[in-house]
Image (cartoon, rainbow, N blue to C red):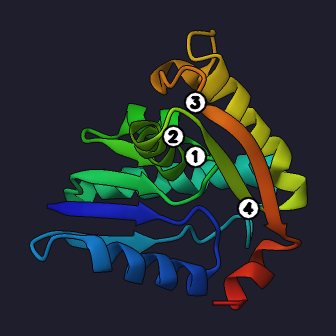
Amino acid sequence: MKIKVINPNTTTSMTEKIAATARSVASPSTEIIACNPQRGPVSIEGHYDEAMSISGILEEVRSGELEGVDGYVIACFGDPGLLAARELATGPAIGIAEAAMHAASMISTRFSIVTTLSHTKIIAAHLRHDKILQPHSSNKSRSFGLGRGGASQRYYCSRMLSCSRRR
């Protein structure tokens, strides 16, 4: 099985960390292809950066389809471009926010979202409100179906790249 893990930003050091983590949990028979777009934001720290990353994500999915990739992981907690990626992919396309919320909902009836940046709390609030609290509204939250599981959102760092360097 081939899984393409797409880091939507252009920071290769972050992509390398994502690749190492994905490979550490993948089955030995699973090939992990970690990538990032050639163009786009160096870090995704808000709505603008998310929007600027989507064309790169979709290019990676298109090329993955030509390479025979079986599934995709969008490695950004805002899940930018997820629904568009699903339209292009013949296999599953999963966002890490959606996956994390589904996993959390199996462990507890309530959970919090911890984000890295103070100004991305609005994105976490969007995830919490649109994707959890209103699962049957007319937006993309329908696919999450998590009911009222999200309790709060928190942040712990001031800039994404500085958080990445702490590891």
Neighbour tally class for label 3: few under 14, some 14-19, many 20 plus, Cα within 10 Å: many
First in sequence, mark 4 or 1: give its number.
4
According to the picture, the residue beneath numbered tag 4 turns out to be 44
First in sequence, mark 2 or 4: give its number.
4
Neighbour tally class for label 1: few under 14, some 14-19, many 20 plus, Cα within 10 Å: many
Amino acid on which disc 2 is placed: Leu
Q: Classify the position of the N terminus by image quarter.
A: bottom left
According to the picture, the residue beneath numbered tag 3 turns out to be 149
Dot 1 falls on a residue whose secondary structure is: loop
Q: Are marks 1 and 2 in contact (CB under 8 Å)?
A: yes
**Which residue lies at the image location 71% right of the left edge and 90% below the top edge?**
166
Dot 4 falls on a residue whose secondary structure is: loop
The residues bearing labels 2 and 4 have C-alpha atoms spaced at a distance of 15 Å
Residue nearer the viewer, 158 or 83: 158
The label nearer to you, 2 versus 3, is 3
Residue 141 in which image quadrant: top right
**Which residue lies at the image location 73% right of the left edge and 58% below the top edge?**
115
Which numbered circle lies on residue 79?
1
The label nearer to you, 3 versus 4, is 3
The residues bearing labels 3 and 1 have C-alpha atoms spaced at a distance of 18 Å
Q: Position of residue 22 (x, y in %)?
A: 36, 72
Q: Classify the position of the C terminus by image quarter.
A: bottom right
According to the picture, the residue beneath numbered tag 2 turns out to be 82
First in sequence, mark 3 or 1: give its number.
1
